[in-house]
Image: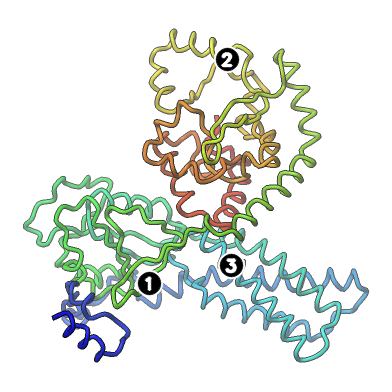
Amino acid sequence: MASTDLQESKRLPVGVVSTEAIEQLAPVLPEPSGKERHRKRRPRGVASGVGQVVLTSIPLICGDLLVVLGSFYGAILVSAALLGYAPHTNFFFQGLAVGVSFLGIGLLMGLYPATGVSPVFELRQLVLSGFFAFSLMLATNAMVAVLSPIELLVGVIGGIVAMLLLPIVRATVRHMVADRGWWGERVVIIGAGVQGQAIYKFYQRASQRGLRPVGLVDRWHDAQPLSPPLDADRYRYLGSIDRLNRIVPRHGVRWGILAPGGCDGMDVSGVMRFCGDLPHLIVLPSQLMIPSLWASPRECAGVMGVHVTDHLQSPVNATVKRAVDFFGSLFGLLAASPMFILAIAWTKWKSPGPAFYGHTRIGRDGKKFKAWKFRTMVPDADSVLEDYLERHPEMRREWIEDQKLKNDPRIIPGIGHFLRKTSLDEIPQLWNVLTGEMSLVGPRPIVQSEVERYREMFPYYLRVRPGITGLWQVSGRNDTSYDQRVQLDSYYVCNWSPWLDTYILLRTIRTMAMREGAY
């Protein structure tokens, strides 16, 4: 029998897919399209599919072109002044060519309409598109004729400025149009369980991502009751799954998010039969915490798989991160030296004792180190805290849950509150970064007593160096619970890349300026 199977396998050529693997899967047979069965007119004010894409793309295109053309023509003026050249008319057409090439590259890289994309992914695509557009201009000039010094300088200056400004202007444009009813594409959430409700709330808050949730669908038939029932004040329920072919054209929906988590007995393949009218369908995992930023679909013998890349295991990425940490911390220490003198003098004036405070923390691979900060608390902070909690027992629960107090009696009046609200108290940790004990970006360093709070997530924490700033600090900081902080730290480790670090560093500037979540 074995030899017969072997002979049979030898006769068959190795094809694109494995029929043995495919036959184990249930086929998804779509229902007849609702567009064919129900030729209903869209309600007034609901744009067509193409209309939604165009309206969503136009503001983004205008913002990008403003940056690219402004950077290019601004670089011409700067370069001409530096080199003493008079700009010639060819530069006008070269600028238009750079703008057109950027739009073409951006379209290929998913920047238009960029509906629902992560800001980290968008940051990477914008920077790379700007780099390729200006590099293409320089390469074309070099091949067609001799590359003049002014053309080289224009390309370098314009490219650098464009790559710096593109993410900032894109975020500004998204913020400006986020609440406009005509902007964005409509999405229906399939599954009214815990996962579906969380996705619905997220996209309602994050309207700048361009996905507009119109409601949730669940159950197979309207006769089946929802269990547990939905809160009608917080969620909009559109009907049962078998009504999708009516719901999609009626509401002008182009996107669907299938969220089976928390929906008992949901048959994903069965649900997908009713999604034939949706041009875009996102299927979420119900149990596995798969890294989401850099995962990509991968065909495997005819079966859909998810290719997950662990960037932490790349020696190149590790070298880049350490180089950025070293030179960034060195520059930061030199630039912040005047502030060190001012903070030391102010602290000693307001409170006797040392200006710096060192506390033992857990680092990468479990190694202990002393993390440095400007001292923002009174010298006998522990006894002050214990006395305060005894006099205010209602505050003990807040301390146990979050390890922080909004009205902390230990903080030095004036200088202490200022340093903590602006996060400047952590500037001395640049020394920890320089010596390799910490990183500019990473999970917040924890003490031994906090290990049990991380539970099964603690191995994630040990994989990286703790950071001065991190995903927790730019995602609400003290306004989040401790469990949410653990989830954010774990997400950072699972999805780490140099682009995520870059996004967090840029977002930190805004967080410090707005004092978001600081007290």
Find residue 343 and report its horizontal and vertical position in percent: 74, 27
Left or right, residue 250 beside residue 402: left
Relative to residue 171, is residue 305 depicted above or below? below
Nearer-N-terminus badge (1/3) = 3
The amino acid sitting under disc 2 is Ala
Find residue 440 and report its horizontal and vertical position in percent: 63, 45
Q: Name the residue under label 2.
A: 381
Q: Which of 84 and 178 is in front in this view?
A: 84
**Alpha carbon of mark 1 to alpha carbon of mark 3: how far?**
25 Å
Residue 126 disc label:
3
| Location of the N terminus (image quadrant) | bottom left
Left or right, residue 407 beside residue 376: left
How many numbered marks does the figure carry? 3
Secondary structure found at label 2 = helix
Q: Nearer the viewer, residue 211 or 129?
A: 129
| Location of the C terminus (image quadrant) | top right
Mark 1 neighbour density, 10 Å: few (under 14) some (14–19) many (20 or more): few
The amino acid sitting under disc 3 is Leu
The amino acid sitting under disc 1 is Arg
Return the residue found at the far left. Answer: 223
Give the residue at x 72% y 64%: 161
Give the residue at x 60% y 72%: 129
Left or right, residue 197 beside residue 472: left
Secondary structure found at label 1 = strand
**Alpha carbon of mark 2 to alpha carbon of mark 1: how far?**
55 Å
Mark 2 neighbour density, 10 Å: few (under 14) some (14–19) many (20 or more): some
Toward which corner of the image does residue 68 lie, by quadrant?
bottom right
**Alpha carbon of mark 3 to alpha carbon of mark 2: how far?**
47 Å
Relative to residue 413, is residue 294 depicted above or below? below
